Amino acid sequence: MTRRPGTRGRLPVVLVLPALVGLAFLLVPLAGLLVRAPWATLADQLFSPAVGQALSLSLLCASLATVICLVLGVPLAWLLARADLPGRGLLRALVTVPLVLPPVVGGVALLLVLGRRGLVGSHLYSWFGISLPFTTAGVVVAEAFVAMPFLVISVEGALRAADPRFEEAAATLGASRWLAFRRVTLPTILPGVVAGTVLCWARALGEFGATITFAGNFPGKTTTMPLAVYLALETDPDAAIVLSIVLLLVSAVVLASLRDRWVGGAA
Amino acid sequence: MTLHADLQVARGSFALDVALSVAPGEVVALLGPNGAGKTTALRALAGLLPLDGGSVRVDDAVWDEPPKVFLRPERRPVGVVFQDYLLFAHLSAAENVAFGLRARGMDRRPAHAAAVEWLDRVGLAEYARARPRSLSGGQAQRVALARALATAPSLLLLDEPLAALDASTRMLVRTELGRHLGEYTGRTLLVTHDPLDAMVLADRLVIVEGGRVVQEGAPTEVARQPRTEYVAQLVGLNLYRGRGSGTSVALDEGGELVVAAPASGVVYVAFPPSAVSLHSARPEGSPRNTWPVTVVGVEQHAHTVRVRLEGSPGVLADVTTGVVAELRLVPGARLWAAVKATETHTYAG
């Protein structure tokens, strides 16, 4: 049914004006990036070894970090949503701390715990000879630390929205809690898991503060795209713009490809 | 081989204390108003809610006996049909039915074959691949029943199995459910607030109010002699079993009734006491069922008087106090009862 125009009254200026300003505020910087792009030398820059290296390192680390977040974060979300834990509210609040914590602080904290002389890191080093700071593995750890809350919150929300009685139905059919989770709960919350995974991956891909603090800036080893952008800005602004455009493009492609199928599409 | 349960559960100010026993092949209905503790009792039997006291045992096997024994739900040989069925939306009908067999360790192929066979038994063979979302309410109920029965449970628990259906489907599904319960050799506990479901499907009624059993017995027994106000209202219904031919039904307990809808074979005829009118002489005219009756009891209810009458058949009638005075309704009084055919409901047994 089409509504006759004008029947609902005019849109209030008080709302429309700030809305338009807000929209411009979000979009103009992105447009500026495209306007200032060195289109003539774009191809050369794009396929330069430096960009390729940073990009592949970024994709690899963000993906590994996302896998870690999935393996640890989904069970954590289940525990927060379903188990009868004492002090569950406090636990939930603690899990979300990295969301609001300045990433640099997160990096410092990681360094204090996992550094070669850190609480856990000293044992890792003396027992296994493993040292995480300033390595590619360190990048993955830093990204996972910062990105995991996004996944946990998203999955926990989906779990709390899912009717726990389906798990009870599965139990009466002979399914253990693990089987019920795997065969009944997980398929039900899959859209939430996928949405959380995308958010988590995007956050990991853009991670800067914790990475540079914990893993440093070593081209080929720990210099991910955001670090490369920051570095290039001082020496070669054109390269910084190209790197930024690549990051923008990757994010846009991932969001767009998942959006229709999972994120919001079904809901 | 009988299930013996002494269910004691405390939840805040509510306390459930109900003793139940169900023999193999028997269908027991747990009947009561909302909040009486029926679903709590069912959840305790399924193992979804641990007991605070008492026990659940089937023969020598103890399922729950605090504080020592508690068998988790997945370890109990039960089948549950939930009120809104709780079919798994991401699985097909056949996968839903096969779920219990798979969970109990059966391989994929035989489990699928058994599931398809069960769907065939409930008349849904061609819906094996259908998702629950695309099934009608009645079909979903049958899939839920097949899923619960597929694992050959020794205890079948039905939680308001017909409550989610509309009136027309309900009658059909009720009849079919009755047939499947008749074939089932295990113990069945039916939880319902609908006296009609209970009367038609159950061999025995256990009526609970406020977490306690207030009356127990065969449906006809409970209907004849309600012991609390709630039960009287609950069974405020004249219900007869008989054999129909055309619009005439010969009742098992004697007598004959003319009904509105033609019926054949074993049928139930029901009508409310308010549909019965009493007369001092045989009424003439309109197409009515009329038969002589004798007053055996008169009870004052909130706004009406319920009269218990003997005759062929015996019947309950609700009349106004005016009628009581006018007809001198005292025990022993001889009257004529009349019921319009259009006031009767008939359904297959």
Image: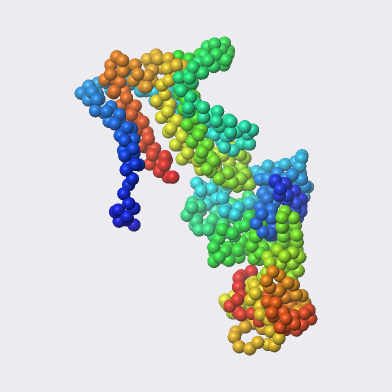
| Pick the front one: B248 or B111 | B248
**Drawn side of residue B202 relative to residue A71, left or right:** right
Q: Position of residue A131 (x, y in %)?
A: 51, 13
At 77% from the left edge and 82% from the top edge, which residue is drawn?
B333
**Foreground: B173 or A192?**
A192
The answer to whether residue A23 shows anywhere in this view is no
Task: Point out residue A198 in the picture as x, y percentages from the top left corner.
Answer: 42, 33
The residue positioned 41% from the left and 21% from the top of the image is A208
| Residue at the image point whose x is 74% and y is 44% from the top | B52
Left or right of residue A120: residue B42? right
Residue A229 occupies quadrant: top left
Q: List x then y, in percent, for residue B345.
A: 60, 73
The type of colouring in the image is: rainbow
Q: Quadrant of the N terminus of chain A?
A: bottom left
Residue extending farthest to the front is: A14
Residue A87's place in the image compared with A228, above or below, is: below
Image: B169 above or below B82:
below
Question: Which residue lies at the image location 32% right of the left edge and 47% below the top edge?
Answer: A11
